[in-house]
Amino acid sequence: MADKAKAVEVDTVVIDGVALPPQWNRMFEPRAITEYDLTALDEVTAIPGAESLGWCYQCGKCTAVCPIDTVGDYSPRKIFRRTQLGQSLLESPDLWLCTTCSNCLRVCPKEVNMIEIMPALREQVVSEGQAPEELLTAFENTARYGNPLGEPARKRADWVKGAGVPVPIMSQLKAPVDVLWFVECYPAYHPRGQEASVALARILHALSVNFGILGVEEKCSGDSQRMAGESGLFEMLAEQNVRTLSKYEFREVMVTDPHAYNAFLHEYGAYGGNWSTRHYTQLLAEHLGELHFVREVPWRVTFHDPCYLGRHNGEYEAPRALLRAIPGLELVEMGRCRENAYCCGGGGGGMWMDSFTAQFTTMRLSEKRVLEAIEYGAEVLAVTCPYEVSRFEDAVKSTGNAGRLRVMDIAELLAQSMDLVP
Ligand code: SF4
Ligand code: SF4
């Protein structure tokens, strides 16, 4: 039991000639907080990687920036408190709602690190087959087909047929290239992702970039599966991708996907994959002066910073430099941008858990973001992460804003202005 605080009152004390009657000199003894059974918290902090949850001192800074809290009841502070009060985080839906957007870590004075806590805890649960059904399906698809969409591996390079420009495949090319383009799953399979891939291929061709793709040899980078708790699957994918890339000669890797960017930058090195890697916006920004814009794009455009390009990896300028260069385009910033950008809800496995998450939130993060873009008067929401086109386009429809806001990849906007797409 707790030693309850006892008020200690002294009769009247006189300090510097000022008399303090008992009601003003009431003091409390230091309180020993022992009423919590810390078993649930100890269970979490004993797991390697999850120790920092125990460092929370409840300042609440994270709650103000957590995207989930704007549509639900969530933040590291709240998670800590519930765990402190005895709720098992390993059995709670809280375990699956975090998108690993990293905004809490940015502001936390105690460095409570959800980017390490979440994968560590999820891994324990996933190893017992206990994750939300949708997530398990995405894991299974990735393991079986090399992509979370469950598309046949042999169709991975089918989008190339509609590119209208040569998109060399390394196994057929049999020659070194300057840029190895790691396309990733959604840009290879999703219809809207494919359109962005075609736009990007045409831009690369117009710039005479010497590039190649892996085609059917490429597998999902696996970074989101890792954050969602499937580290074994990630390891398998990393080993396969590194082995495949190592067969070829190239100067640098260019990725379409910020999640793949994160994997190449921080994870693949441990598997022998140490290549200079850039996001496509970074590579194109270097060629800004060579992009031949021939059409005005007279739209009011706002840009959604992907968590894994911006906050996780510090790139905020390259996408904006490209957008600013497009003639006629007016770039407006939303309030929550750059370091404090809102999250689309797709990171950390959120991409595959929309139905699960819907049970605990009032709306999807993508819906919240779309409404925000409209509030700022944007006609186009520019994106540069392959998860986002489909997420935001769905959100435009589900919020009843069809026809009011277009969602376009930056590659598509550039290609429009360069007259490379209809
Ligand atoms: S910001 Fe950090 S210390 Fe403050 S409540 Fe959140 S997790 Fe706890
Ligand atoms: S990483 Fe993002 S979603 Fe997860 S708790 Fe922190 S702020 Fe919320």
Image (spheres, rainbow, N blue to C red):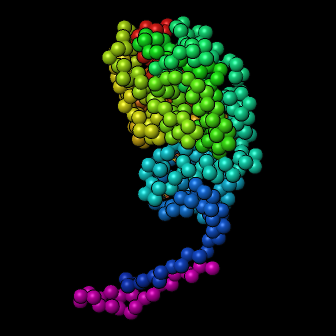
Percent x, y for residue 190?
62, 21
Q: Residue furthest bottom?
A: 11
Residue 301 in the figure: left or right of residue 392: left
Q: How many marks?
A: 0
Residue at position x 47%, y 83% in the image: 29
Q: Quadrant of residue 169?
A: top right
Percent x, y for residue 75?
54, 52
Is residue 274 depicted above or below 249 in this figure? below
Percent x, y for residue 117?
58, 52
Residue at position x 60%, y 49% in the image: 118
On whether residue 21 falls in the magenta region, the answer is yes
Q: Residue furthest left?
A: 17
Is residue 130 depicted above or below 350 in this figure? below
Q: Quadrant of residue 414?
A: top left
Q: Quadrant of residue 237?
A: top right
- Please identify the quadrant where the N terminus is shown: bottom right
Of residues 193 and 212, the one drawn nearer to the viewer in this rendering = 212
Residue at position x 58%, y 54% in the image: 49
Q: Residue furthest right?
A: 129
Residue at position x 46%, y 15% in the image: 210
Residue 306 in the figure: left or right of residue 247: left
On whether residue 125 falls in the magenta region, the answer is no
Residue 309 in view: yes
Percent x, y for residue 208?
43, 11
Residue 306 in view: no
Q: Which residues are magenta?
A: 1-22
Of residues 18 and 228, the one drawn nearer to the viewer in this rendering = 228
